[in-house]
Amino acid sequence: MSKIEATELGGRRTTGKGDRHITSLATELLRIAGLAGLFAIALVVLRDDPFLLNILAYTCLFGGLATSWNIIGGFGGQFSLGHGVFFAAGAYTTANLYFHFGISPWLTLIPAVVVASAVALAVSWPTFRLKGPFFAIATLALNEVAFVLANYFDGLTGGPRGMMLPFRAGFENMVFTSKLPYAIIMIGFLLVTLVTAAIVLRSRLGYYLQAVRLDEDAARSVGIGVLRVKLMGMAVSAGLTGVGGSLFAMYIRYVDPPTLLSIQDVGVRFLLISLIGGVGTLYGPLAGALLIVPLEFQLRATLGSALPGGNLMVLGALLVIFALFMRKGLVGTVSDIWDRYGRRRDE
Amino acid sequence: MSDATALAAENLTKRFGGLTAVGGLNFSLRRGDLLSIIGPNGAGKTTLFNLLTGQHPPSDGRVIHEGRDISALAPEQRARLGLGRTFQISKTLTSMTALENVMIGAFLHRGKLAAAAEHAMHILDRVGLARRASVRAGTLTLSERRRLEIARALALDCSVLLLDEVMAGLNQREVDDVIGLVRQLHAEGLTVLVIEHNLKVVRAFENRVIVMDFGRMIADGTPDKVLSDPQVVEAYLGKKAE
């Protein structure tokens, strides 16, 4: 090192504070609070329009689910296609406890988290030994196995006929006559997943997950237990996904295997939304949901009858476009542009 | 063991099928030592490095760290005990900033984000990268990335730093730069093991050198003594024409 550089560094030593260079959790929480404000305004504007409230509820639900998936799939780089299993685990837990024991769905959220996380840990323990595409394929298989099991164990799931959850309107039953409370619940779910994801991202676990994604050898060289970190990320991700499943079950009050475990409508959807929005970024999954979910409703309404499957064709084309030109998704692309301008300004 | 041995190899051996990559190697580093291990291509340097860091289990013999047999430990367990390392082909986390790369190491002993960031900043300062803290690692120059890897290892509060050909691919000025850094760290009391192909680099350190060839130790001593050893010259240049 040259002498000049050394003195220069010596001079900076007192000013070198690390946290100035990273976005703090407090900043992220403020941003999320800002989002909450925007959603509150949306609620006020849309309060008398059940059609749009329904779209808002679904957007937030799937935004929250994609945000949950992103914790292990994005931060940790483990492309799970099996999150439908944890979604279904949460949905069936709530459905059973409400249907058979009359327990308030609000209280069932806790066992839903526990069951979904436990299922996730049990199936991830062996599958995390697989890497990259092999892991993804194994989780895809898990989803299919769960589908068969759900059809078979009709005592727990109602089998192929499904379970119709009784309509008993009231706050304690999480059943409402208007769409507005559901929209509020789904916004709440989205905010909870965003806050959780922000806490994870701005913690040791988040950094470790990213290190594991970027380079497992490098991660191990700094003392990171790779399997342990993946399992922790998966448990958090699956627990939140389970809550999403519970809320979904109470929203449509009907659960059956095709609704909960269909690959294209559930398992792959979390991933697709995250990919389009920006995988591995905090707000990418939400951005993806804001684009995809309303678009899907619109497509189904306009194309659904005229051209069956037309909506899927549009979504597929969109995914291809993103894969070709915007590999980092909406948020990743924007932040790259931001970075480029930021650097130019610095120098 | 009560003496000041930081890292030692005892009869360390690695066989791949019929090939003995490292055969019965013995050496030890005391705390505060700077040891270079050199050898021509195929001498077994990288295999030795992998045995020390835990990438491969040894076929025979032991790796001792601070008096403890660590031969059976995985790389991450060795890192937790204080073995810091760099990679021959640099493995910085390119999409993260320099600071975050070092934080990944700092988190080992500091759970809180702010504490890890502060420690990482301090380390970046120490290796001369403080000004580059918020630059993505992927956009750093090669020599900066080498420094960054060293910083990441230092952030573990490591007791021994293992450097795997940190000079590879650097130009002369950059090599001098990194040599300066390694000497500075050594002067600050760190135990350093350098595995190096480049003889010039080893000469610059003026410390003890071990020369390997075909998995065995063929010379041990100061750079001047070792580099004039006919066996070493032969290993690098081939036999003298008669």
Image (cartoon, coloured by chain):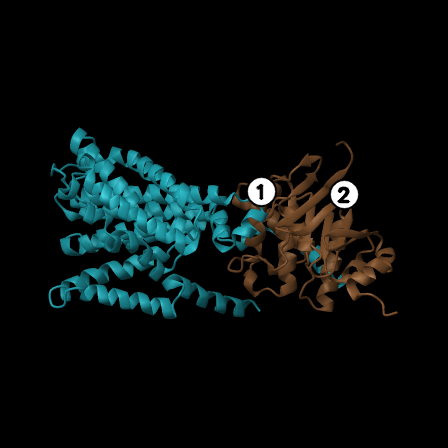
Q: Amino acid at mark 1?
A: Ala
- Letter of the brown chain: B
Residue holding disc 2: B28
Q: Is A145 on the left-hand or right-hand side of B112?
A: left
Mark 1 or mark 2, which is nearer the start of the sequence?
2
Residue A240 higher or lower than B194, as above or below: above
Task: Please tell me how crowded label 1 is: few (under 14), some (14-19), or many (20+) other residues with Cα within 10 Å.
Answer: some
Name the residue at 56% across, 54% down. B101
In the image, what residue type sits under mark 2? Ser
Res. B74 mark = 1
**Chain letter for mark 2:** B
Q: Where's the N terminus of chain B, which quadrant?
A: top right
Chain that is coloured cyan in the picture: A
**Chain under numbered label 1:** B
The residues tagged by marks 2 and 1 sit, at their Cα atoms, a distance apart of 21 Å
* Mark 2, secondary structure of its residue: strand
As drawn, A234 above or below B128: above
Q: Quadrant of residue A287?
A: bottom left
**Image spot of residue A14 (x, y percent):** 66, 51
